[in-house]
Image: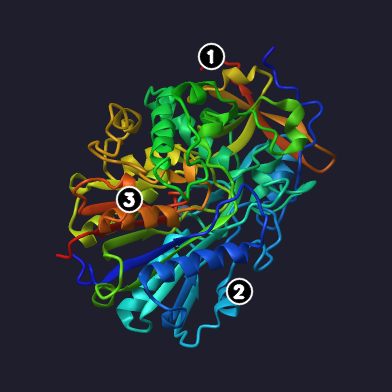
Amino acid sequence: MTMSDWNRVTRPIPVPNEWTKPFWESARRGVLALQRCQACKHFQHPPYATCVRCMAIDLAFEPVSGKGAIYAYTIMYHAGDKRFAAAIPYASIIVELDDAPGALLAANLLEAPYTEAKVGRRVEVVFEPLNDDITLPQFRLARDKQ
Amino acid sequence: MWENRCKVAVSGVGFSRVTRSAEIPLAAHALAAVKGAVEDSGLALSDIDGLATYPELPATGHAMVDGITIVSVNCMMAMLKLPNLAWHVQVETVNIGGAVQQAVNALLAGVCRYAVVWRAMHNPKGTYQNLPGAQAQGAAQFTAPYGFGGPGQGMAVAYTRWLERHGQSREKMATLAVTQRRHSHKNPHAYFCGQPLTREDYLNSRMVAYPFCLYDCDIPVQGAVAIVLTTAARARDLRPRPAYIAGYGQRLAFEVAGRIGSLSSYMEGGRSSSRLTWERSGFSPKDVDVAQIYDGFSASVIYGLESYGFCKEGEALDFIQDGRMELDGELPLNTFGGSLSTGRIHGLWHIIEGALQASGRAGERQVEDVNVSFVGASAPIVQGTTFIFVREPY
Ligand SMILES: [Zn+2]
């Protein structure tokens, strides 16, 4: 079987900061929201102090659809981080969202064999609660036929 | 062209013993390399009046302990007690190539006469990476929870994109690993000197972070290398034939920390750094007789060959086939074995080999009739440096 076993993995818990808090608060409510420049409407991730396209400082978090494609990926075989040893081999993917070209999100490919990770494959967001405060956006293969 | 081309040269070079992990303090490695380079030039330590390094830890998460895990300019000065020190710098960006470029500038400005640059790399016994704890802070909050731990994964994701967008196969990379290993058998300082590597070894080796297998990753080691730089006029009076610096370029990453996986940033990094080097030197890729391209992970060589302009995008794995990267090939490549064979010493060893090939001092691995010797010392390429050394000033 080529499914990665995530049940025995202890993930490091993200610590939200001033810039990233809205991202994690949205994720906890099951909404993927990215930082968007209010001047030029460019989405960016990770969050930053200024718009990386036009240097504007008027930035706000806005929901995105959560549909996109695998931009790149790797299959991890080496247990460099022992907490992930139980899941090896597993797919770490980089997702480019339809709504936010250029804003790349790291994730794991869930609910599918790791061999399904391929550049360009359609994916959609799912949410994986880590504790009461933090929920990780994750991705699975897209279920609609768009 | 650059008005200062060929006004500064690399003279002596020096190497410490390279060991798998720390057996003696890192300062002892750095000292051996620096003394070796000064001696190779035929200088005395008291002649050295400039010091430069990039002291960053290669492995993440370990404490910076001067003399043990890093070797700062302060540490070197405490050992050497140079009576005539006139200039020093410790750079924080663009890795060791940035320190070399600062030394070139200092020599051009006339604020020192003989500068030494070293890179000392620590490999602790036990775990190389010391990964974030139960909490993921800062940029790591968007990567560590997904098991993105070491630098290898960041490089691997760009490589899958390259492979699948261009319909290429990772098996072709065996040529790079095997040829570089063969080159290293003519480099007595290399960690893997004398240890054979076959195509079958490469194809059967264990996967680390697909598409990288074990032999796509340079081996972490403890060691140091060093060079002496001086003005061209002074270099001509020293023992070694000078390797003249015809031009250099650099690129500071303009990516936000924590953004990973962008093949296009690697390519843009290499393009903009090399463009400066081509413009300043007046050469183009077709003029290059021998090339050293940073290979901390094998795929860096792909991004280098393509973004520096040696071949088209998507073609690098085909470019290195058919003997093209052999010592007598069309573009002899990583002729000292590269980091894949010397061990992880970052880009200064690539710079050393570029200089040795230009000055005709590469011994058994010397490429015939070298005039133009190119170095891409970027580690990684998204922010890094490039150089051209020449045998004959022009
Ligand atoms: Zn903007």
Q: CA distance from mark 1 to mark 3?
A: 62 Å
Q: Amino acid at mark 1?
A: Lys
Q: Nearer the viewer, mark 1 or mark 3?
A: 3
Q: Which residue is mark 3?
A: B363
Direction from residue B278 to residue B137 in the image, left or right: right
| Tally of numbered tags | 3
In the displayed structure, would residue A135 be above or below residue B124? above
- Subunit bearing disc 3: B
Q: Nearer the viewer, residue A61 or B240?
A: B240
Q: Which residue is mark 1?
A: A145
Is any part of residue B265 visible from this angle? Answer: no
Name the residue at the top extreme. A1
In the displayed structure, would residue B380 be above or below residue A122? below
Q: CA distance from mark 2 to mark 1?
A: 62 Å
Name the residue at the right extreme. A132
Quadrant that contains the N terminus of chain B: bottom left
Q: Amino acid at mark 2?
A: Cys
- Subunit bearing disc 1: A
Q: Residue at x 30, y 77 (%)?
A: B108
Residue B256 at what x, y percent from top left? 53, 53
- Subunit bearing disc 2: B
Are callouts 1 and 3 both on one chain?
A: no
Direction from residue A11 to residue B55 in the image, left or right: left
Q: Secondary structure at mark 3?
A: helix
Q: Residue at x 47, y 33 (%)?
A: B159
Q: Which residue is mark 2?
A: B75
Residue B30 at what x, y percent from top left? 55, 65
